[in-house]
Amino acid sequence: MNKPIRTVSVGIMLLFLALMLNVTYLQYWRADSLDSDPENRRAVDATFSQERGAVLVGRQAVAESVPSDDRYEFQRTYAKPLLYAHATGWFNYYNAQSSDCTTCQQWIEQTQNDILSGDDDRLFVTRLVDLLSNQGQKGGNVQLTLDPEAQQAAFDGLRQTIGPDGQGSVVALDPRTGKVLAMVSLPSFDPNRLASHDLSEVNAAYEQLDADEDDPLNNRAIQTTLPPGSTFKIVTAAAAIESGEYTAADQVPGGATYQLPLTSGETGLIDNEGRSCGTSLIPFAQAMEQSCNTTFARLAVEVGADAMRDQAEAFGFNEEYFDDLQPQAESVFPRDMNEPETGQSGIGQFEVRATPLQMAMVAAGIANDGKVMRPYLVDEVQSPEFERIEATEPELLSEAVSESTANQVTELMVSTVDNGTASPAAIDGISVAGKTGTAQSGVDDVPPYAWFTSFAPADDPQVAVAIVIQKAPGIDRGEIAGGLLGGPIAKAVMEAVIR
């Protein structure tokens, strides 16, 4: 072979080698990054066109893919959209590619994307069978923990109470496991509008929702923190009993007013807004029944800032614990408080802030003999044929209080339903434990927030509920009270679960 031919041959061999190396690099080393590149429209089209699995509540698919007669083959649809929007979220062309964004809004459609899309490693055999049979890839299913009757009761009760322009949330938990039985946030939205194949329609719908001052895309159950007001007195009572200085049968400080330490005048004066709280000493039960601010502010000062913070954190404050939807706002109990601030924190004011999920966990922890279970929304994941792949195992988050303390706080809360401010949650023939709360917003022209938390049956708890009414335009400021507004909603939700 002469030199020119040999040179050309070597050059061609080098080009083939370079081509093979490039193909190997692209198909092996960069395959995942190219596939997930948002600029790769072919990958997005393929992902958006496949048949995703269903999101199930009970036996009903609340999110599923149905055949479509356009280029994308399948249309994502949402049954009862307003009822389940803040659980399912939506799936459309813009979020068809999975993202590593940890601060973005992530619903079940995003947090469970690998299962729903069929990309999860646990569905490898299913994908292989689909490939060999020349069928399109099918996604697995996600079974939620939601109780459909409890969810409907929560939605209907809250909507009837706050009206079409109101804001609020309801959360119900199984205290024994941490299962989320109901999670409602109002105002809600229709995810079908955001899942359309008409991208101009999707853009218009999203811009409208995003610009809405009532923020319907916000899941208030886990993303809005507000002062919990007197519902926080459950935590204060637990801390006082855990300290060893009090029992539920003891007398506690009472009185019409209490001047916070190191203060003078109106700024440091705590009163009971006309409720009957005796004079120097009153029964602990009376203090809880009447929600005596003077009692619980003084108890918090006696317990001390550090012990109060430890007790709050034992129930879940100052941490994140809910993985199935993101992001989660941390409920806050402040650090490094002085005595006046500690006293205000004991009645759920100062800088104490909580989500409805957090206050449901407080009630659930008391109901479950002092043990707080990690809340979860995904009950199990399934194959496309509805065969169970993996179920969520209940997980202990913390032992917030002793069983004895939990039982004593339960007694106080039952008495509050039987004889006090939480009476609107009473259920005939069933012992109910509850606590009301009305928290000041801290803004002159913003009405207070109404809170309610409860669990039932008190002797064998099956459900713990927390309700917050953030805005109720049709209700006079003077009529905003946790028991009056939240009690009937809690009763309906508890009855739906116990039934």
Image (cartoon, helix red, strand yellow):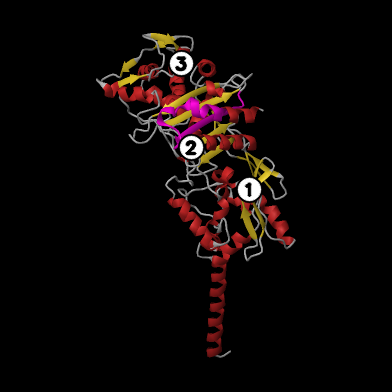
Name the residue beneath numbered marker 2: 168
Q: Position of residue 356 (x, y in %)?
A: 49, 34
Q: Position of residue 128 (x, y in %)?
A: 70, 57
Nearer to us in this view, 16 or 239:
239
Instruction: Classify mark 3: helix, strand or loop.
Output: helix
Q: Quadrant of residue 236?
A: top left
Position of 460 relative to 320 (above/below) = above
Nearer to us in this view, 20 or 37:
37
Number of numbered discs present?
3
Name the residue beneath numbered marker 1: 79
- At 66% from the left edge and 48% from the top edge, which residue is drawn? 141
Name the residue beneath numbered marker 3: 241
Disc on the earlier residue, 1 or 2: 1
Q: Give, as a three-letter code, the residue at label 3.
A: Ile
Q: Which residues are magenta?
A: 461-490
Position of 187 relative to 302 (above/below) = below
